Image: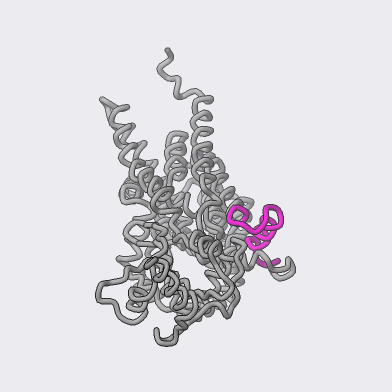
Amino acid sequence: MNKNWFKQWWVEYLFLALIIAFAAALRFYKLGAWSYWVDELYTFENGLRDYSDILHRPFWIITKFAIESFGSNSFALRIFPCIFGIVTIPFLYFPIRKIFNSRVALLAITFLAISPWHIYLSQLARWYSLLLLASIFSLLAFYFAIERNSVKHFIAAVLLFAFAFSLHMTAGFVLMIALGYLFILSRMPKFQPDGFSAKKVNWFFIGLVLEGLLFIPQFIAFVEKWESIKQAMGYWGSTPSNFTMKVLYHLTPAMGVMAFAGLVLLVVQKERKGLFLLIYCLLPFLVLNLAAAFETNVSTKYVFFSLPGLCMAAGYLCNYVFEKISSGRLFMGAVIFAATILPSLLTDFTYFTTGHGNRDRMREAAELIRDQFREDDQIFLLYVFENPVEAKFFFKTIAELSDFHPKDEQFIWPETPGEIDLNKRIWVVNTGNIIPPDATGFYKWLADNASLITEFNAYRGPLDNSVKIYLHRASNEHSRVKLADKK
């Protein structure tokens, strides 16, 4: 047998096909089964608007098309984010192979294919998988523009950035990364590529700044809107350490360590691509940590687009170690590879089982109440949201997607337990909270007056996303039940 069989072109593409197929299976699996995260309901709401109202938001247009094609359901809302997540795998393979080699490219897309973070956001009815795709290709086009002094690549980078910015304002990090890379290159000649044209780079720099200035009004409007959301819904409580731990949870610590070590190795070796990846992966992370330090609401989803760069760095490290090992190469390579991917696969298993797609199970709760709901029943949403308006929107939208249409007046928001009408059946929906033995207030009312009907368990790491359904039976119904028990 030819010992170099793995170097043949067909083997490379066979591995690529297998990785794509596995990535597609992971992203399609249970795509329509999960309940809804609250932001997915805002996606649904925007997807019902007229085309004339959403022409400036490409993702809402895509969502509206999906709803018209597949109906108002979770599969329709998530199908295009899922597709964008899948096609990212083969699309990224070829530019990564140009920057590194085929082995690093295969390793990088394998890490991306099994990434719990990428699977989750590819199954989420939001723009994040598309934003990652547009952002990374904007940055790759920019990287090749500098490497090759290519104006056409620069134009492609600018256009892709504009599209990414239309999806979400955090695409502004793309511009920040590009400007940071240009600035460092201009100050560090040893990192400059052959044929580096300072004049052309200056024009690139000016072009990026001008494009950024065009989007400043939109960015200011976004910041103002975000501040109003913070005032309405409160501060999430993210600190730099808390934010970092959340990123590591999604990435897995093993991948985080491998990626960081790969970035350090690339920079130590004075690799220009390493400098680019370092800025790409760390600059947004550091900026958001700084924002968290000033009690600004930040989300790990805002650094999700850096995931391909982290996968590249981890792939580079794995390949570097493999090439430097003189004896037992295959065995040691397999050990390092397994140590990197096993935590991701275990997290994937949790995501698809006890984690229920990193969502609470409010859809199951709404469907259970729907099947037993009576005309005079009432619903009390306890600790779903502190804001009753948000709480009702969340539950009602999920209910309507399940063909359950409770009326506005059937939702109650008593300020004290004494305001509750005990002559009516009341469904109580409680999310992620356990009634303590020394309960007071509404918790005490629940313990004394309502029966636990069922519990839909869901756990996202240390977080309890379980939904508990209680039922308070009307006073006259209690009497009938007691009489039946005596008989």
Q: Is residue 277 visible?
A: yes
**Rendered residue at 43%/34% (across/down):** 103
Q: Position of residue 162 (x, y in %)?
A: 61, 62
Of 249 and 45, nearer the camera is 45
Reply yes or no: does residue 52 show up in magenta. Answer: no
Of 265 and 463, nearer the camera is 463
Q: Residue furthest top?
A: 1
Q: Position of residue 165 (x, y in %)?
A: 58, 64
Reply yes or no: does residue 56 show up in magenta. Answer: yes
User: Where is residue 73, by image quadrant?
Assistant: bottom right
Count all numbered tags in the image, as a single digit: 0
**Rendered residue at 53%/61% (across/down):** 367
Q: Which residues are magenta?
A: 54-76
- Above or below — where is 381 with respect to 333? below
Image side of residue 67 versus residue 178, left or right = right
Colouring of the image? one colour
Q: Position of residue 469 (x, y in %)?
A: 43, 66
Q: Position of residue 301 (x, y in %)?
A: 46, 61
The quarter of the picture where the N terminus appears is: top left
**Rendered residue at 53%/30% (across/down):** 13
Q: Main secondary structure of the magenta part?
A: helix
**Rendered residue at 39%/65% (across/down):** 487
Image side of residue 261 versus residue 25, left or right = left
Image side of residue 454 versus residue 167, left or right = left
- Above or below — where is 64 with respect to 18? below
Image side of residue 118 versus residue 127, left or right = left
Of 50 and 443, nearer the camera is 443
Q: Residue furthest front?
A: 487
- Above or below — where is 268 with respect to 72? above
Q: Is residue 272 visible?
A: no
